């Protein structure tokens, strides 16, 4: 994975001192909260429901063991012994003190980490496929490109005061494992007929109160123009975003109001103006970055056999292991959705263990996924059993990846001042209702996502089953949505009808599942059945 | 405290500043004001006679002025670009990089604090309207 | 009743106006009636509180109970981690929120 050179380190170190100075000025009363707020947001520091909350960037979800141990250490030393992995591959700490925030950033800087631009109206953490470098279906590892654009959009002088946040994703396969179409700017690496490497460029996806799947804006962008084209997109958005209404300022609104064609034309015209500035990063720099992402030293003689005689191990393999491009190796999904747990939370001890195990079994690398789980990208098949035993002992081996209990849930009203309803208890009750492991496997792939408010951090719009918490006359109420997908078959979920209270929504999910079981044909996931039969049978079962 | 912070050697133009719409109608003005919603490219035919472009920031969060400045510099404008309005000291570094060379914000700036924030970052990741050499270039020299 | 709340500037702790000071316990909050703007300004200007505001609450025998569930979660702590709340030893504390 990428390693900082003296320049990267200098930038991060300077940022720490800048923030320390700003925080000190705030504590001394020289800055008001209004003046300080955008400055602290540029460093991922929120004033949240219970305390300050810090969101640490994990670029394209990739960590080594040294960084992972630092995350555990911060949880212990400065927080309350745990961290929360988010739907943008970052980690959040909920109990931070302002007077210690600069010290935390200083410690993060010693392991090449930061919280730069993780909140506020910034260009946010760049996401990528969590199986990058390991997946058999990728045409090339997308992460060098993610790293390039990450650097190029950090501390950008023209684009540091944008209308709203801006989220970028990079993928390199037909299967979209990073919800790329739900990002403001999405790059999909492809080869054209001549075999040249380039991007399909998508602009205008997003969640929130007006979700959109991004349309294709350019069908082929040569890779060497990734940055200049990004500048063109940002500049068009900066100029033309609606500024009358905070809820209309994301680029998705502009793309939707103009239409993809007009937006593409404006960007193209701006890009032609920008190109002569020669701001593009030269190819040799991309090569320098890419060298850090060379495949690890795989054992060419590793056996492709897995001994599945242990039945619990067998189930875990079937559910959580994905095919690696290298024979003898496997991609391991580690679920942070244990029964009665909190989706995406991990204790400091668990995070330390993940660091040790990644170092030992996965070439010192692990990934955070937007589904709030962990991936060990390169595990020898002959090591899987030993790894599983150690994970299992620590409660890190639920065999539920992509099953109904693998729920994506935002922190909700238990943690977030934006929320209208609690999401975690609903996730726990649903997981409890469907706890039977065989029953879950029989249901098959079922991506259930819960958001505690309309900001949709739980990605409920792209859940096969989505749940949205709302405030109904001062009490918590939950809307049920069906048929969303954050994969390459992207679609937005539709609301079923009137909302339910907390117990009602769990029953409603059960009713929906029962109807699915009734109607499903061979091999159909819930999503497939829903797409075939439509909303009507479910609506009828829920409300008649 | 200072009212106008200026990074140019020449004298500040004393011309009255006109809006973009009156500017193109008139023939003799050399100082123009760009509001946040204006298109800086409207000025491209007149760059030769412009000495001062004032760019207004109605709220410090409104970043349109950064693009306006950079567009003018990209088009070859070498006259003064001045930031006015709601400008905070923490923004001066970015503004300098976008081509602003004078500042007359609503709240006066402390030159000492400005100097600290301008010298905070030794390097830059991307090229802009200034002559700072981006990191990618330093890496391959 | 109206009670005042905010966060401690340095630590971020949720705090409540007691009439003379700021407490971490909502039970100590006092009814400020309708004229509290001056208190908010004075306390914030002196940095004794960060981003203070008023919320409505009902008077109960256990002290003020914020009217909105969000404020009750804020007063106690996350309902899903009783060990992290202000009353970790009280098994009924969550009921007060809900």
Image (spheres, rainbow, N blue to C red):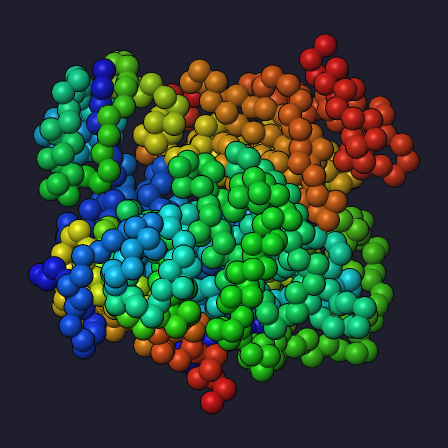
Name the residue located 47 percent from the left edge and 38 percent from the top edge: A248
Is A445 placed above or below C70 here?
A: below
Residue A275 pos. (x, y %): 54, 70
Q: Nearer the viewer, residue A335 or B1?
A: B1
Name the residue located 64 percent from the left edge and 53 percent from the top edge: A217
Furthest toward the right, the residue is A522
Residue B120 pos. (x, y %): 27, 71
Q: Nearer the viewer, residue B118 or A468?
A: B118
A336 with respect to B68 (left or right): right
Q: Nearer the viewer, residue A255 or A303?
A: A255
B17 with respect to A440 (left or right): left
The count of marks equals 0
Q: Quadrant of the N terminus of chain A?
A: bottom right
Residue A416 occupies quadrant: top left
Name the residue located 53 percent from the left edge and 60 percent from the top edge: A270
Furthest toward the top, the residue is A544
Furthest toward the bottom, the residue is B141
A39 with respect to A91 (left or right): left
Residue A399 pos. (x, y %): 71, 47
Residue A538 pos. (x, y %): 75, 21
Q: Quadrant of the C terminus of chain A?
A: top right
Q: Is residue C34 visible?
A: yes
């Amino acid at each position: 994975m990428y390693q900082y050179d003296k320049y990267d380190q200098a930038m991060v170190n300077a940022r720490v001192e800048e923030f320390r100075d700003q925080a000190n000025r705030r504590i001394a009363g020289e800055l008001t909260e209004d003046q300080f707020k955008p400055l602290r947001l540029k460093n991922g520091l929120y004033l949240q429901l219970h305390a300050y909350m810090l969101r640490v960037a994990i670029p394209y979800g990739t960590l080594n063991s040294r960084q992972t141990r630092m995350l555990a250490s911060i949880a212990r030393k400065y927080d309350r012994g745990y961290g929360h992995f988010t739907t943008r591959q970052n980690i959040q700490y909920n109990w931070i003190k302002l007077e210690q925030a600069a010290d935390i950033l200083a410690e993060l800087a010693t392991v090449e980490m930061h919280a730069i631009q993780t909140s506020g109206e910034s260009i946010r953490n760049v996401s990528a496929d969590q199986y990058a470098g390991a997946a058999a279906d990728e045409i090339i590892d997308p992460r060098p490109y993610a790293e390039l654009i990450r650097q190029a959009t950090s501390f950008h002088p023209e684009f540091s005061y944008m209308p709203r946040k801006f989220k970028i994703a990079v993928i390199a396969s037909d299967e979209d494992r990073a919800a790329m179409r739900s990002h403001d700017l999405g790059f999909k690496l492809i080869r054209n007929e001549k075999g040249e490497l380039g991007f399909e460029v998508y602009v205008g996806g997003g969640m929130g109160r007006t979700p959109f799947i991004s349309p294709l804006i350019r069908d082929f962008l040569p890779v060497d123009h990734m940055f200049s084209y990004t500048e063109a997109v940002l500049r068009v958005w900066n100029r033309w975003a609606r500024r009358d209404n905070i809820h209309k300022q994301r680029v998705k609104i502009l793309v939707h109001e103009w239409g993809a064609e007009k937006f593409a034309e404006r960007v193209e015209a701006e890009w032609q103006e920008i190109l002569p500035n020669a701001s593009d990063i030269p190819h040799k720099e991309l090569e320098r970055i890419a060298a850090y992402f060379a495949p690890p030293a795989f054992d060419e003689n590793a056996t492709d056999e897995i001994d599945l005689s242990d039945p619990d191990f067998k189930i875990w393999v079937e559910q959580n292991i994905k095919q690696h491009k290298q024979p003898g190796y496997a991609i391991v999904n580690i679920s942070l959705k244990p029964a009665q747990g909190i989706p995406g939370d991990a204790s400091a001890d668990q995070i330390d263990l993940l660091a040790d195990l990644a170092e030992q079994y996965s070439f010192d690398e692990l990934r955070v996924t937007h589904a709030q789980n962990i991936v060990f990208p390169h595990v020898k098949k002959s090591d899987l059993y030993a790894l599983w035993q150690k994970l299992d002992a620590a409660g890190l081996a639920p065999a539920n990846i992509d099953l109904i209990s693998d729920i994506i849930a935002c922190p909700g009203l238990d943690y977030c001042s934006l929320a209208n309803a609690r999401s975690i208890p609903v996730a726990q009750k649903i997981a409890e209702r469907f706890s039977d492991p065989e029953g879950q496997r029989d249901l098959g792939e079922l991506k259930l996502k819960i958001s505690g408010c309309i900001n949709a951090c739980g990605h409920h719009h792209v859940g096969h089953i989505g749940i949205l918490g709302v405030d109904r006359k001062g009490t918590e109420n939950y809307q049920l949505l069906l048929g969303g997908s954050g994969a390459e078959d992207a679609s937005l979920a539709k609301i079923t009808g009137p909302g339910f209270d907390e117990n009602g929504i769990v029953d409603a999910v059960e009713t929906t599942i029962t109807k699915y079981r009734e109607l499903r044909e061979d091999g159909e996931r819930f999503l497939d059945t829903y797409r075939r039969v439509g909303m009507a049978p479910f609506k009828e079962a829920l409300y008649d | 405290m200072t009212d106008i912070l200026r990074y140019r050697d020449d004298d500040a133009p004393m011309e009255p500043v006109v809006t973009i719409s009156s500017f193109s109608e008139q023939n003799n003005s050399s100082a123009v004001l760009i509001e946040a919603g204006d298109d800086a490219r409207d000025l491209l035919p007149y760059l030769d006679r412009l000495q001062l472009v004032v760019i207004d920031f109605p709220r410090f969060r409104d970043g349109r002025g950064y693009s306006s400045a950079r567009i003018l510099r990209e088009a070859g404008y070498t006259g003064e670009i001045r930031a006015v309005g709601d400008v905070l000291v923490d923004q001066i570094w970015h503004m300098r990089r976008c081509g602003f060379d004078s500042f007359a914000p609503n709240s006066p700036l402390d030159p000492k604090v400005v100097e600290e924030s301008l010298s905070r970052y030794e390097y830059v990741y991307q090229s802009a309207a200034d002559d700072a050499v981006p990191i990618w270039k330093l890496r391959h020299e | 009743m109206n009670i005042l709340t905010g966060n401690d500037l340095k630590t971020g702790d949720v705090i409540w106006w007691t009439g003379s000071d700021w407490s971490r316990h909502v039970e100590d909050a006092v009814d400020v009636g309708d004229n509290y703007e001056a208190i908010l300004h004075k306390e914030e200007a002196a940095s004794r509180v960060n981003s203070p505001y008023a919320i409505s609450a009902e008077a109960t025998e256990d002290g003020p109970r914020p009217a909105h569930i969000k404020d009750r979660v804020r007063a106690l702590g996350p309902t899903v981690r009783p060990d992290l709340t202000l009353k970790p030893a009280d098994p009924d504390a969550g009921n007060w929120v809900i």
